[in-house]
Amino acid sequence: METKEPRKELQVSAIENGTVIDHIAAKSLFQVLKLLHLENYENQILFGTNLDSKKYGKKGIIKVAGKYFKMEEINKIALVAPTATFIVIKDYHVHEKTKVEIPDEIYQIVKCFNPNCITNHERIPTRFHVIDKKDLKLQCRYCEKITEREDMVFI
């Protein structure tokens, strides 16, 4: 009698050259697409959400053909997808694999929590110092108020 092995196939097809962003929390997938400004990217973008993951239960994945991201772009993603992994693909092979890290400074990604902050009234780009990477707390450079994870509004 013949035993059947589980069928293994890619749910999102492979790319020849570009970047794969894997292990994104399923609920954060569309936020990652927005933070990387991929809505206007003209090359092929493949994404999947609510995919089965042994490590996280459900996950999202994004594959961007022909694009390689800078480290500061990659680290922005850590604010919304701290478990994400960036994988550089060249000729269908993994060339480099990096886990995201929360940077020490955050520029123009998050709105200041303080309604009286100058960044909420004038055209001044927001700028924060990360004071707690584990619980994610950002201190505004201008008003010094602390914005916590649950209060974050992405620009």
Image (cartoon, helix red, strand yellow):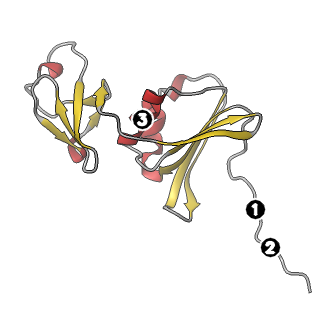
From what the image shows, is residue 57 above or below residue 146?
below
The residue pinned by badge 2 equals 5
Residue at x-position 47% and y-position 29%: 71
Alpha carbon separation for disc pair 2 and 1: 9 Å
Task: Check whether the beta carbons of the residues at disc 1 and disc 3 lie within 8 A of each other.
Answer: no
Q: Quadrant of the N terminus?
A: bottom right
Of labels 1 and 3, the one closer to you: 3
**Horizontal placement of 39 versus 35: left or right?**
right
Q: Amino acid at mark 3?
A: Asn
Neighbour tally class for label 1: few under 14, some 14-19, many 20 plus, Cα within 10 Å: few
Residue 150's spot in the image, x, y percent? 23, 47
Q: Place residue 129 in its image quadrant.
A: top left
From what the image shows, is residue 146 above or below residue 24?
above
Q: Amino acid at mark 2?
A: Glu
Residue at x-position 77% and y-position 66%: 7
Of the pair 35 and 83, the residue shown nearer to us:
83
Q: Residue furthest right?
A: 1
The numbered disc on residue 75 is 3
**Horizontal placement of 7 versus 69: left or right?**
right
The residue pinned by badge 1 equals 8
Residue at x-position 40% and y-position 41%: 101
Q: Amino acid at mark 1?
A: Lys
Task: Check whether the beta carbons of the residues at disc 2 and disc 1 lie within 8 A of each other.
Answer: yes
